[in-house]
Image (cartoon, rainbow, N blue to C red):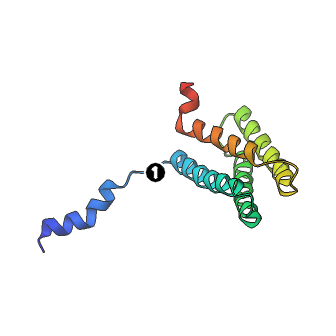
Amino acid sequence: MTAQFMAQAAYGAARQTAIKTPRSIEYETFAQVTSRLRSAAANKGNFPALVSALHENSRLWILLAADVAGGDNALPAALRARIFYLARFTREHTRKVLTGKDSADVLIEINTVVMRGLSGQEEAA
């Protein structure tokens, strides 16, 4: 085994791995949660999967609400207020979905819009 081969083996993977920004991590998290929520909502016969996906979505929004409520959050106050409102709305709408009074479609749409914003697509629109 040559020194060059060993160096490529050790550092090649690190070179190929993209550096993740907080924004890209948030996007990936939303994408994973939204994908699970979309799949669970489409599978009407698996209520436990829907409950699990809704719980995961709720946890995400609780974390976001806590983050924007903190004094050290650098986002503009108006944006922080909108995110906090969306967190409250998702909590209330999740209750409706769990009781069968509504569908998860609105929650999926909200997450999708947030993902567009995180990816910069909203700025281009």
Compared with residue 116, is residue 49 higher up or lower down, i.e. above or below?
Answer: below
Q: Residues within 10 Å of mark 1 (few under 14, many from 20)?
A: few
Residue at the front extreme of this rendering? 45
- Give left or right: position of 124 versus 6: right
Q: Which residue is situated farthest in the top direction here?
A: 125
Residue 56's quadrant in the figure?
A: bottom right
Instruction: Count the numbered circles shown.
Output: 1
In depth, the one of 94 and 87 nearer the eye is: 94
Say which residue label 1 marks.
Answer: 20
Q: Nearer the viewer, residue 49 or 84?
A: 49
Looking at the picture, how far across and down is residue 108, in whole percent? 69, 46
Amino acid marked by disc 1: Lys
Q: Is residue 104 left or right of residue 12?
A: right
Which residue lies at the image location 41% right of the left edge and 51% below the top edge? 19
The residue sitting at 81% across, 52% down in the picture is 94
Q: Position of residue 80 (x, y in %)?
A: 72, 39
- Asked if 68 appears above or below 9 in the picture, the reply is above
> Which residue appears farthest toward the bottom when viewing the image?
1
Q: Judging from the image, what secondary structure is the residue with disc 1 in?
A: loop
Estimate the x, y position of residue 117 in percent, counting from the top left. Answer: 59, 36
